[in-house]
Amino acid sequence: MKKCPLAIILIISAILSGCDPIVVQTTEEPVQPEALRPVPAPEPAEPTLSAAPKAEVITASQQYILLAEPWKKYFRSSPKLLIVETPSAGIQDLLDQEQQLIKTVLDSSSASGESSEYAELEEKLNELKTIIPAAETASGYVATRSSNYTYVSGGTIYTRTGSYYDGYYYTAFRAKQKSSSPELVRSVQGLVHNASLDTKDLDQRIEALQRLISKWNRRTSELNASGSSGLMREANEAYLSVLRAFTKDFSKLRTEVMKVENEQERILKNKSQVLSEWKAFEDNRLSILSDFLLTNAQDSIEASADGNFTLPTLDSGVKTYLVCAIGDRDLYFEVSTDRKKQHPFVLVDVTPQQ
């Protein structure tokens, strides 16, 4: 006997109506604050007949080396660079916090001479050594009919010389431009050349420069105001004016050294609090910063065998970040061609000239 299809349908409906409904459970992921959520990239529009497909953009590249002293010694692996679109204000705030906290942690574990600020002061001292005031002199021969042994014209002293050649006597005058005292110049160079950032050493050299200025002010004022002595007097006065400004720069450097040493002493006294603040940031916020930078990186660049990083020409809407392993975690630092106060890392362009 064949069963009616309608009867079969009624039987199945009765069975289903007696069963419990199937429940599908879903788990919602925690929502990040709006300021910290990465903005998803817009989906590319489909090409139409009225719009030509976008051409591939070919950008030039540049070669950079990374200056990482004095923190280079903390690296546990080779660092790399990330190219990321300019982040939101929330992510930038996290990055600033991380950079400042890491700096404080590392400074609390080292002497003042190993801090990033101290390395900057070393650079300033070396720069001062390269611009030590120096006398400018020049010489040459100038033909003249004057019969005097020497004469002064404008800012130049001329000294006569003569020689016979092929039966004739030729007269010429050696010209020497005004120049400050070589003794004064040598004294300044000797005082500055071996200077260090030790505050006692700086104090002694600054005092010696000030005594030298006072001594040569007196000597210069006693020179005759005319003739060759007048030229020496004018040159000494100009040199002493430059030397006063140079000595002020030395005094400013000494003040900055004291500031760094005082800050280092303060950090060492609060080392336990410094470590506690970093631990709280690492446990609760570092992962947010890491996830954003790694997820949104347009490119990850490692150094070549010669230590150079090859970077494309970047527009104003992206930034470059250094990723380096310090201790047991990866840390992130914004880098550019200018030194940041929160860390010592800087990129230096070494692109070969065409």
Image (cartoon, rainbow, N blue to C red):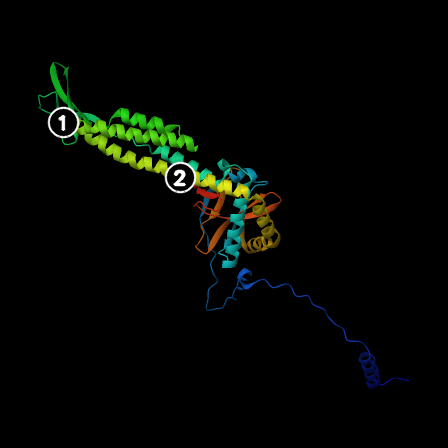
Seen at 58% across and 49% down, the residue is 278
Q: Residues within 10 Å of mark 2 (few under 14, many from 20)?
A: few
Furthest toward the right, the residue is 1
Q: Quadrant of residue 288?
A: bottom right
The label shown at residue 227 is 1
Mark whose residue sits in front, 2 or 1: 2
Decide if residue 66 is in sight here.
no
Check disc 2 and report the residue beneath it. 255
Q: Which callout, 2 or 1, points at the residue further toward the start of the chain?
A: 1
Seen at 37% across and 28% down, the residue is 193
Q: Secondary structure at mark 1?
A: helix
Q: Residues within 10 Å of mark 1 (few under 14, many from 20)?
A: some
Locate residue 234 relative to residue 293 in the image: left or right. left
In this view, 330 is above or below 244: below
Residue at mark 2 to residue at mark 1: CA–CA distance: 43 Å
Residue type (three-letter) at the residue carrying disc 1 = Gly
Seen at 82% across and 84% down, the residue is 10
Residue 231 position in % (x across, y down): 18, 29
Residue 233 position in % (x across, y down): 19, 29
Q: Please state, as top left, top right, bottom left or bottom right, where the N terminus lies in the image.
A: bottom right
Q: Please state, as top left, top right, bottom left or bottom right, where the C terminus lies in the image.
A: top left
Q: Quadrant of residue 21?
A: bottom right
Comparing 318 with 222, the one in front is 222
Residue type (three-letter) at the residue carrying disc 2 = Thr
